[in-house]
Amino acid sequence: MDLESMTQSDYEDQQFKGAKHKKTHIQSKNFHECTFKNCQFNETVFQDCVFIACVFEGCDLSLVRLPGTTFSETIFHNSKLVGVNWAEANWDHHGLLKRRFVDFHACTLDYSTFIGLKLEKLTLHECSAKQVIFEDADLTGADCTGTDFAASRFVRTNLTEADFVDAVNYAISAGLNTLHKTKFTLPEAISLLHSLDIILVE
């Protein structure tokens, strides 16, 4: 099914394959258990849309805008989401608060923003998250394994019980963030010492 032919407001268990919609404006559409495969949504605006239990596979959503859009139990796999401001989406779910919002697997999220978001148990598995802003975000219990966080910004970020095993290139200050039972692996974990007022002697 092609999004250009959409006339309904609600779509359930639909498959969208190879759709190309650069700079499209999609408004007030509800998607439940839908699959988007190899679709291109570069610079598309999803306004006041709802995605519940949806899957994006091999899609390009770089520079998409998400004003008022809601996500619940939605998975992005092997997709490109460069330069996305996730903070402008709607995270006040009114009854969906106990559900997972979004998960990312093997995705490119470079230059994106998660400022101030509560995303407990978020999955960022084996992703590229370079120059991403996580300032004031709550990533309690997040799975960040195998992800590249080069030049990403963690300030006042709650990383309680987050898992950074095999993650690389992160710069996390123990004094500026909440680290409680957070998992790290050597040698990358040595970078945590750089924020402390200590002298390392080889």
Image: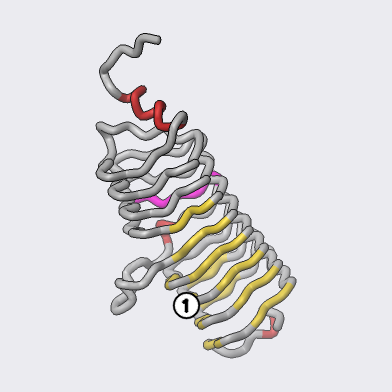
Q: Is residue 148 above or below residue 141?
A: above
- Viewer-side residue, 32 vs 127: 127
Q: Is residue 116 above or below residue 99?
A: above
Q: Residue at position x 45%, y 35% from top? A: 170
Is residue 113 highlighted in magenta? Answer: yes
Q: Answer left or right for 136 relative to 77.
A: left
Quadrant of the frame with the N terminus: bottom right
Q: Which residues are magenta?
A: 110-116
- Residue 25 image position (x, y, % from top left): 59, 70
- Residue 99 image position (x, y, % from top left): 36, 72
- Viewer-side residue, 95 vs 141: 141
Task: Count residues near mark 1 (Cα–Cα under 10 Å), then give few for <14, some for 14-19, many for 20+.
Answer: many
Q: Name the kind of residue labelled 1 in the image.
A: Ile
Q: Which residue is mark 1?
A: 52
- Viewer-side residue, 17 vs 188: 188
| Image label count | 1
Look at the numbered disc 1 and give the secondary structure of its residue. strand
**Which quadrant of the figure has residue 155?**
top left
Q: Answer left or right for 25 relative to 184.
A: right
- Residue 136 image position (x, y, % from top left): 31, 47
Q: Residue at position x 26%, y 18% from top? A: 197
Q: Residue at position x 40%, y 26% from top? A: 190
Q: Answer left or right for 33 relative to 24.
A: left
- Residue 164 image position (x, y, % from top left): 42, 44
Q: Residue at position x 62%, y 89% from top? A: 7
